[in-house]
Amino acid sequence: MSDASAHALDNHEPVTSTGIPNKKVLMWAFLGSDCMFFGTLISTHLIYRKISATVGGNFLDIRDVFDIELTSFSTFILLASSLFMALAVSAIHKGNLSSTRLMLFGTIIFGTIFLACQVYEFTHFVHAPGNELTLSTYRGEPHVFGSTFYVLTGTHGTHVAIGVFWLLGWLAYSFTGKMSTAHALDVEICGLYWHFVDIVWIIIFPVVYLMEYAL
Amino acid sequence: MSGHSEDPVAEESKRFFTFFNLSMILVAITGIEIVIIYVQTFESASIIGILFATSITKFCGVIWWFMHLRWDKFLNTVLFLMGLVIALGTYFAVIYMADAHPVVEKFEVSKIENSWKPDHEYKSNDVVLENGVYYQTKSDRKSGKSFQPKNWEKLDSIPHLVSYHITGGADMIEINSKNPENPYFLLSHPDGEEEIVESTVALLAADATAADFRLKVRSEAFWTEAQ
């Protein structure tokens, strides 16, 4: 059992017959269902990517639009945010409030940088001269790539945004003076969500972006 | 499994180094992925294989250590894996159901300029050119020593041979003329054979080549066009 679960038992958090706190079981069940959700979106993208390989009779080369340097930078940023999140959970377990606050702040900053990169990326794609990629067209021709790409990466971005707001809530709460190790489980659950967002990107980055350069 | 120690603070201090080392490993693996793509030394299949391996490694690293499954009860792992297995099952099912991409290997349209030949076996709908006029048979017949117009039907249009070779299977083939003044439309529904080699006679108002037509091939969800 993790320390958060031990704290939960100490703090009389409701637990299931398995000895795992209800909140944690709920979060893991949610993450399992979210796996299915992203699995469907990634499958849809890959299938339609294969079906619609051409635009106006020419082979689609999405590398003309992708900015792999920017996306690689975003990936490193999200990985770094995961380290901050893990350290925030570790700090709250140890009862180190100032460290918890600092690590939460770091996670929020890195998450916000990731979102800013995604907003820049989407704007750049839609307005790329001669290679405009919109929801329904590519280079002005009807194409499905934009639909599946924006829905997949946009849904991930929405998850990141929700995570940032959740973390902001905890950061604000840490200044009320009420935060203690009793909240370790809650912060750990927030951390589970954040790490999940990270692992989804770990799949999206090679499958959606890097694979285009390998094919 | 239980990793809960007597001293949670000491345990968390140990985890700090675990988290830091893991983070560095994840960054290094991501760097390797990007370098592999930039260098392009390997074949596509090898690169995809490497990307899958590195992604799975990073995925496992994050869920095992960052998400505490290493120290949590096994039930959490089971709950998560259930969703993951269904997601993977969905992916492979969709990939399996998706048909292969049909490929138009050849698409040709050429004017028929076969002259009439004596003592030749002609089949129904065969076309010949005699004295600048096109004729077509309506039944199988063997020609005599000289051309007999009464045995043939005179054509007012120009016959063209439309031939195509498609691999990868198809359940619908559509040929459209791009020129409204020289209309032509053909729709056929093959049985889904892997290789389709067909030719047909098209009676057109004017001379045309393959560039004047659009060939669309459908195989389940896949559409391929040759223009």
Image: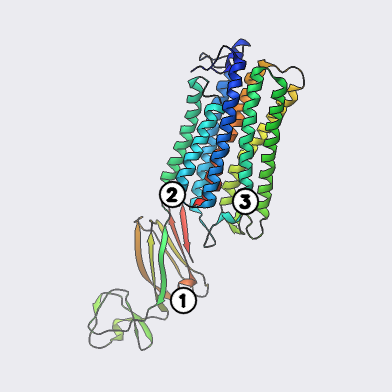
Q: CA distance from mark 2 to mark 1?
A: 42 Å
Say which of B5 and B220 sits in front: B5
Where's residue B80, x and y in %? Answer: 51, 28
Q: Can you tell which mark lies on residue A18?
A: none
Residue position marked by numbered label 1 in the rendering = B208
Name above or below for residue A29 compared with residue B153.
above
Q: Looking at the image, which residue is at 46% across and 79% down?
A: B207
**Residue drawn where x is 62% and y is 51% of the image:** A67
Picture coordinates of residue A168, whole percent (x, y): 72, 29
* Disc 1: CA contacts within 10 A as few (<14), some (14-19) or many (>=20): some
Q: Nearer the viewer, residue A18 or B172?
A: A18
Q: Could you tell me how many numbered marks the image carries?
A: 3
Tag nearer the camera, 2 or 1:
2
Q: Which SS class for mark 3? A: loop
* Amino acid beneath label 2: Ala
- What is the chain letter for disc 1? B
**Of the image marks 2 and 1, the number of the one nearer the N terminus:** 2
Is circle 2 on the same chain as circle 3? no
- Residue A67 badge: 3
Q: To which residue does mark 2 refer? A: B45
**CA gap, disc 2 to disc 3?**
23 Å
Subunit that carries the residue with mark 2: B
The answer to whether A157 appears left or right of B220 in the picture is right
Comparing labels 1 and 3, the label whose residue is closer to the camera:
3
Q: Residue at x 55, y 31 (%)?
A: B62
Q: Going by the image, does A103 lie left or right of B58?
A: right
The amino acid at mark 1 is Ala
Q: Is residue A103 above or below residue B190?
A: above
